[in-house]
């Protein structure tokens, strides 16, 4: 039995591992920052945006902040972190290798988003990522035993949503519940804690394990922001509960400047 975790910044090693795999394997993907990430206009990892968000968090309750975050997420345009993910999906299809999503995404309602699972499925479907095509498990499972306060962990349409609960524990529950035990698991995630959690689960279940700590999103350049425009965007978010696209933001500032010119 083998068990190892490698840190990678692209998918080259993952592609090689998938080339060596067959239908006795299971490939698991984290979703955010592994398959998809925010487009520039909704990416909140930029230092200046983090600063603006922290300022809002000081003034508002946690519930209000959740609501604002959900407004940013609701209509975001996701993009692939690395286009080589499509090579991996093509290999999985060609070699008939089982694969699933494994995400900590909350389930149920989150702020203005009525159903986080439906939101996630819609976002992935727009990018033509459909885990049902690869999943070895067809049943829908709702897990009431685990609760981290972010909804009930759920397996649906080929994706396991742990609702912020420990990934290894939820995966173990699903494997035992369905009596499905692959010979080996390949898992790609951007957070070491999740990779270690699955490593422990695989040891317990005597499943070979290859984890990849994927840092691809960290090397995608941050957008070049106009701080004055960003300040306006965040003010509108806080006061009007709207997240303006870049185009809407430009129109807003032009109309505001036009009004200022008329009034002066």
Image (cartoon, rainbow, N blue to C red):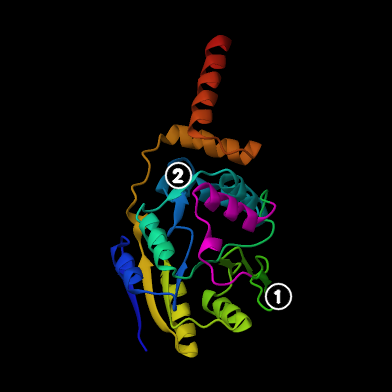
Q: Is residue 206 magenta?
A: no
Number of callouts: 2
Q: Counting other residues with Cα less than 10 Å from the Cα at mark 2, is it few (<14), some (14-19), or many (20 or more)?
A: some
Q: Counting other residues with Cα less than 10 Å from the Cα at mark 1, is it few (<14), some (14-19), or many (20 or more)?
A: few
Q: Nearer the viewer, residue 52 or 15?
A: 15
x and y percent of residue 114 in the render?
70, 52
Q: Up-down: is 253 above or below 179?
A: above
User: Which residue is under mark 2?
Assistant: 39
x and y percent of residue 11 in the render?
32, 62
x and y percent of residue 154 in the render?
64, 68
Mark 2 vs mark 1, CA separation in Å = 34 Å
Q: Residue at the spot x=65%, y=71% of the render?
A: 139
Q: Quadrant of residue 24?
A: bottom left
Q: Up-down: is 250 above or below 9?
A: above
x and y percent of residue 126 in the render?
53, 47
Q: Up-down: is 60 above or below 170?
A: above
* Quadrant of the rendering where the C terminus is positioned: top right
Q: Is residue 147 left or right of residue 38?
A: right
What is the secondary structure assignment of the residue under circle 1? loop
Q: Earlier in the sequence, mark 2 or mark 1?
A: 2
Q: Residue at the spot x=49%, y=26% of the render?
A: 250
Q: Quadrant of residue 75?
A: top right
Q: Residue at the spot x=44%, y=75% of the render?
A: 23
* Quadrant of the rendering where the N terminus is positioned: bottom left
Q: Is residue 9 left or right of residue 172?
A: left
User: Which residue is under mark 1?
Assistant: 144
What is the secondary structure assignment of the residue under circle 2? loop
State the extent of the magenta-drawn residues as a range: 114-138
Q: Is residue 126 magenta?
A: yes
Mark drawn on residue 254: none
């Amino acid at each position: 039995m083998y068990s190892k975790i490698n840190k990678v910044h692209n998918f080259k090693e993952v592609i090689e591992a998938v080339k060596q795999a067959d239908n006795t394997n299971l490939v698991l993907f984290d979703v955010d920052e592994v398959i998809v990430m925010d487009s520039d206009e909704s990416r909140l990892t930029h230092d200046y945006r983090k600063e603006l968000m922290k300022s809002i968090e000081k003034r508002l309750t946690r519930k209000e902040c959740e609501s604002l975050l959900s407004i940013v997420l609701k209509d975001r345009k996701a993009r692939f972190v690395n286009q080589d993910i499509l090579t991996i999906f093509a290999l999985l299809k060609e070699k008939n290798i089982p694969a699933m999503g494994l995400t900590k995404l909350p389930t149920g309602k989150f702020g203005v988003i009525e159903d986080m699972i439906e939101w996630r499925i819609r976002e992935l479907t727009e990018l033509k990522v459909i885990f049902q095509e690869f999943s070895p498990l067809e049943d829908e499972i709702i897990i009431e035993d685990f609760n981290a306060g972010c909804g009930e962990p759920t397996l649906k349409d080929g994706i396991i949503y742990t609702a912020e609960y420990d990934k290894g524990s939820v995966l173990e529950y699903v494997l035992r519940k369905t009596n499905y035990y692959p010979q080996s698991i390949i898992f790609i995630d951007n957070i070491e804690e999740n990779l270690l959690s699955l490593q422990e689960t695989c040891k317990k279940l005597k499943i070979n394990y290859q984890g990849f700590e994927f840092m691809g999103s960290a090397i995608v350049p941050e957008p070049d922001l106009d701080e004055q425009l960003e300040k306006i965007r965040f003010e509108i978010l806080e006061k009007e509960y709207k997240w303006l696209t870049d185009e809407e933001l430009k129109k807003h500032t032009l109309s505001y400047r036009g009004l200022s010119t008329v009034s002066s």
